[in-house]
Image: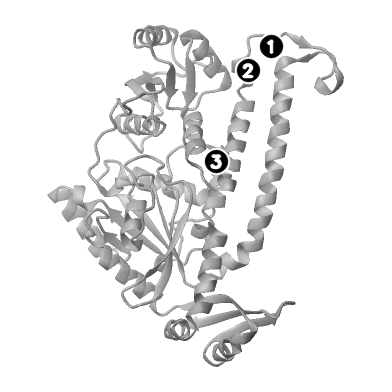
Amino acid sequence: MNGNEGGKRSRPSFQVSDQPVTKALVLLPWLKRAADQRRSATERLAEAVGLAAAIHLDIQSADIIPLDVIKPATLLGSGKVEELGGQIKKQHVDLVIVDGQLSPVQQRNLERAWKVKVLDRTGLILEIFGERARTREGRLQVELAHLTYQKSRLVRSWTHLERQRGGVGFLGGPGETQIEADRRALQDKINRLEKDIGKVKKTRELHRKTRRSAPYPVVALVGYTNAGKSTLFNLVTESDVFAKDLLFATLDPTMRAIELPSGRKVILSDTVGFISDLPTHLIASFRATLEEVLEAEIILHVRDVAHDETEAQKADVADVLKSLGVDLETRDEGKLIEVLNKSDLLDDDGSAAFAELAARERNTILTSALNGDGVEELLNRLDELLGSDTTSLHLAIAPQDGEAIAWLHRHGNVRQSEPDGEGITHVDVDLAGPEMGRFEKKFPLIVQDALTEFVDAAE
């Protein structure tokens, strides 16, 4: 999960800040024989530039580097490494972004050859997440991913690996090298972080029942980063969630209750955008922030259909969701809506083609989050899908609200009703659509308390 995402899209500018912190060069190694057939090298490079722009780098230039074979020591051939070294020196570059996966040895050797810091795709995405994560668990997960990544790359930072550290107290046994001591120190930090994350997860488990027993059905927005999820979210909920034409503008989940045309209410959840080649270190972070997606009543897959590689982005989203346990291909047809967003950027032919697709596919809707086209149709479709459904509630009802308990027994399917030690009765009940509306009208404070507890627990 993103800003003026619904607006006109332009290629990321190489000059991304009036006061640049770091001058950078972006390189895309492109293996000719085994290139990713989902997307073109040009689009992949543009995405890499967008990622670099997300952390406010002053990008001097960006180049595609065709490769016949991968060199184990430096990824690139020696001639190309030397040529780029001259370019780096001429442009006074401080950082080189290599949009691919570098081994620790390759990263170290390139840094030695170019005498600048080198980041691969994983390192760059970790930097973005480190800057954007806001929730406690999100920050802990990103820090853990950083440390795990750094641990495997300590070798690149040290030129004195043969230096021995003496066995003084707990600092290390006889003959322990500096690199071993540093790796052990990192592991200690990792262990502490894992304990902290475990505590947060236990707290989250205490709220799991509340989250699963939302007072309204949950509708989750998912999609490739910068597809327009946050702009659509803001339009529908009349909110001001951070939304910008920037990759990974949204990292932490946001939830709001909205009213559908019928008057029925649902909870809309905005989530982080996905991206191709997502670092495995961050899958745990995604799993933590995407629980609403895993258990949502309906998923809205928001796509940027004006993007040249919208089909490739769709496939990347499906891959990440599948790794989280959500298979878009096998998901119940009635629980998934494909939102073809940014229709305002399509030319006549593209608009006609996607309009035909939307007309042919029942749960496919063409929209523009920028000007609102198709949004009313989307909300009506949600109404249709949820119209005959029942709402499962978990309510905490105070002793003075005994009338509400009696009402629920008369009009709903009460699955469980148990008082706790403080006199609060915890009720699990299923209500049909009309009965849900009547209950909310008759006992608004009870439903509002349940909604507040749900949103607080989820965020």
- Using the numbered discs, state the Cα–Cα distance from disc 1 to disc 3 in whole angstroms: 30 Å
Question: What residue did someone put label 1 on?
Answer: 161
Q: Position of residue 34 (x, y in %)?
A: 41, 28
> Residue 236: which disc?
none
Circle 2 sits on which residue?
155
Pointer 2 with pointer 1, Cβ within 8 A: yes
Picture disc at residue 282: 3
* Mark 2 / mark 1, whichever is N-terminal: 2
> Which residue appears at 48% of the width and 26% of the height?
120
Quadrant of the rendered image containing residue 180: top right
Upstream in sequence: badge 2 or badge 3: 2
Q: Secondary structure at mark 2?
A: helix
Residue farthest toward the front in the current orientation of the protein: 400
Q: Is residue 417 left or right of residue 429?
A: right
| Helix, strand or loop for disc 3 | helix
The one nearer the camera, 298 or 185, is 185
Pointer 3 local density, CA inside 10 Å: few below 14, some 14–19, many at least 20: many
The residue at the point 61 percent across, 88 percent down is: 402
Q: Is residue 441 above or below residue 51?
A: below
